[in-house]
Image (cartoon, helix red, strand yellow):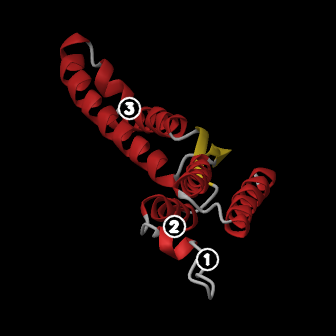
Amino acid sequence: MIYVSIIAGLIIVSLSVVAFKRGWWTVIHRRIVAWTVIFYGLYLATLTGSYTSLALPGIGSIAIGAGTGAAVGFMTWLAIGTVGVATGGVGIAIGAGAMSAIGAIFGGAGGAAGGFGVTTVTYPLVSPFFWGPVIILGVYILRGKRIKMQQMLPPPDDNGT
């Protein structure tokens, strides 16, 4: 990135200096410099970086999973307990505490697994506060005030020519 920026800056400056020194600052040369500046700004806008990190589950996801699992375990105990009385008392034999604990364990494990993974984050390498004005400068050079031909001509000498 640094080499491309240095080369682009040298091209822009050298084109401008040559055009000014030789009196070539015509519409064509101004457009060439303007498009070079615009493309350089657009190039800077496309530069992005990224990093990958390991995402660990938060305490909140584990707690919410465990709480939900315990609630589901308790509700399951209520349903099985009612049916279990008619079929021999299986739900009552296991108990509400055991059913809630089983639900909490599996819910907490599910919450931990849901928050675990690999995350890739992408970010801009060059701030828009830099490449934005570069593009605006290129547009200004491209669409800027027209230079009158009389300003470019040398002043007349003493004999009127």
Q: Is residue 56 left or right of residue 15?
A: left
| In the image, farthest residue toward the front | 159
The quarter of the rendered structure image containing the C terminus is bottom right
Label whose residue precedes the other's in the sequence (3 or 1)? 3
**Three-letter amino acid code of the residue under disc 3:** Met
Q: Are marks 3 and 2 in contact (CB under 8 Å)?
A: no
- State how far apart marks 3 and 2 are (Cα): 64 Å
Label whose residue precedes the other's in the sequence (1 or 2)? 2
Which residue is identified by label 1?
Answer: 154
Q: Quadrant of residue 160?
A: bottom right
- Give the image location of residue 141, x and y in percent: 50, 63
Residue 86 or residue 144, whichever sits in front? 144
Q: On screen, 71 above or below 147?
A: above
Residue 22 or residue 14, whichever sits in front? 22
- Give the image location of residue 47, x and y in percent: 63, 48
Q: Secondary structure at mark 2?
A: helix
- State how far apart marks 3 and 1 are (Cα): 98 Å
Which residue is identified by label 2?
Answer: 133
Q: Secondary structure at mark 1?
A: loop
**Three-letter amino acid code of the residue under disc 2:** Pro
**Three-letter amino acid code of the residue under disc 1:** Pro
Which residue is identified by label 3?
Answer: 99
